[in-house]
Image: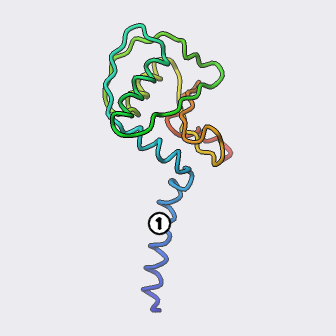
């Protein structure tokens, strides 16, 4: 194999590893949930329970032909909070706006074999889809 062909092959391999590295962190269930986050939604609620807003989001997800998103609430997050909210865009965009108001964040759980793999964890903080990196990482 010529040196230039070998170099080209190594560059291509390195690029594919870099691209795959981000995707490799997601389980198939988490990757499927990230696709669901691209679903278009339109929310207009007044004084509704937070859990009902998430159920409405799931109606759009199901209408788009996906299975519903599983929602999990971290400590300190109440699904009984009342919400008045109006917004449209992708699930990702609407969640960002909705959660920012309440100083909440979310992560897509990506743990092979975990009961909640592929679910979305609503939690205190600013995370948007991925766990926050710790300073030592």
Work out which residue is located at the far right of the displayed protein and give it. Answer: 136
Q: Is residue 52 above or below residue 94?
A: above
Q: Is residue 37 above or below residue 6?
A: above
- Quarter of the image for residue 8 reads bottom left
- Coloring basis for residues: rainbow
Horizontal placement of 32 versus 122: left or right? left
Instruction: Look at mark 1 in the image and give the residue it sits on.
Output: 16
Residue at 43% across / 28% down in the picture?
A: 95
**Label 1 residue SS:** helix
Q: Is residue 56 above or below residue 14?
A: above
Residue at 68% across / 45% down in the picture?
A: 136
In the image shown, does 19 or 67 lie closer to the viewer? 67
Residue at 53% across / 28% down in the picture?
A: 105
- Quarter of the image for residue 108 reads top right
Horizontal placement of 26 versus 34: left or right? right
In the image shown, does 121 or 115 lie closer to the viewer? 115
* Residue 28 at x, y percent in the picture: 52, 51
* Residue 84 at x, y percent in the picture: 40, 11
């Amino acid at each position: 194999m010529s040196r230039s062909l070998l170099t080209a092959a190594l560059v291509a391999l390195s690029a594919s590893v870099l691209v795959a590295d981000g995707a490799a962190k997601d389980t198939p269930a988490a990757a499927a949930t990230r696709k669901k986050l691209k679903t278009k939604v339109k929310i207009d609620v007044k004084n509704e329970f937070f859990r009902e807003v998430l159920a409405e989001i799931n109606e759009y997800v199901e209408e788009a032909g996906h299975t519903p998103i599983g929602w999990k609430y971290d400590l300190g997050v109440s699904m009984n909070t009342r919400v008045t909210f109006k917004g449209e865009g992708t699930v990702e965009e609407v969640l960002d706006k909705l959660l920012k108001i309440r100083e909440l964040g979310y992560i897509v759980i990506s743990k092979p074999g975990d009961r909640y793999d592929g679910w979305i964890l609503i939690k205190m903080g600013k995370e948007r889809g991925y766990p926050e990196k710790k300073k030592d990482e």
